[in-house]
Image (cartoon, grey):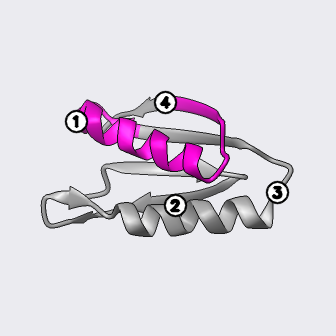
Amino acid sequence: AKDASATAMENVKEIEKKGEEYDAKALNEVLKTAAAEHPDNHDVTVTSEDKVPYQELITVMDLCLQQKLEGISVAGVDG
């Protein structure tokens, strides 16, 4: 199931679960690449279904901040 995604610089990347957890390493690589390709853009939109635990959302936002993507917007999606 595709439960969470991050949109960076007009690119949508869906991060799948690996077992019971989301693949934070894959997400971090996506964010790192996006930040490097667009160094002047620090905006990212994190989308999440209601069933995604709040702590997972915090983890995603922390990963964004690690890549200097400080303009974080959060949006819910139906799922």
Whether residue 58 appears in magenta in the rendering, the answer is yes
Residue neighbourhood size for the residue with mark 1, other residues' Cα within 10 Å, grouped as few (<14), some (14–19), many (≥20): few
| Cα gap from disc 4 to disc 3, whole angstroms | 23 Å
Q: Which mark is residue 75?
A: 4
Front of the two marks 1 and 4 = 1
Give the residue type that dot 2 points to.
Lys
C-alpha distance separating marks 4 and 2: 14 Å
The dot on residue 53 is 1
**Mark 1 falls on what kind of element?**
loop
Q: Residue furthest left?
A: 20
Residue bearing mark 2: 13
Mark 3 crowdedness (10 Å alpha carbons): few <14, some 14-19, many ≥20 = few
Mark-to-mark CA distance, 1 and 4: 14 Å
Question: Outermost residue toward the front?
Answer: 66
**Residue 15 sits in which quadrant?**
bottom left
Please tell me how many numbered marks the rendered image carries. Answer: 4
Task: Of the two numbered discs 1 and 3 on the same chain, state the one appearing first in sequence.
Answer: 3
> Badges 1 and 2: C-beta atoms under 8 Å apart?
no
Q: Is residue 46 left or right of residue 68?
A: left
**On the rendered image, what quadrant is the N terminus found in?**
bottom left
Distance (Cα) linking label 1 and label 2:
19 Å
Point out the stretch of residues depicted in magenta. Answer: 48-74
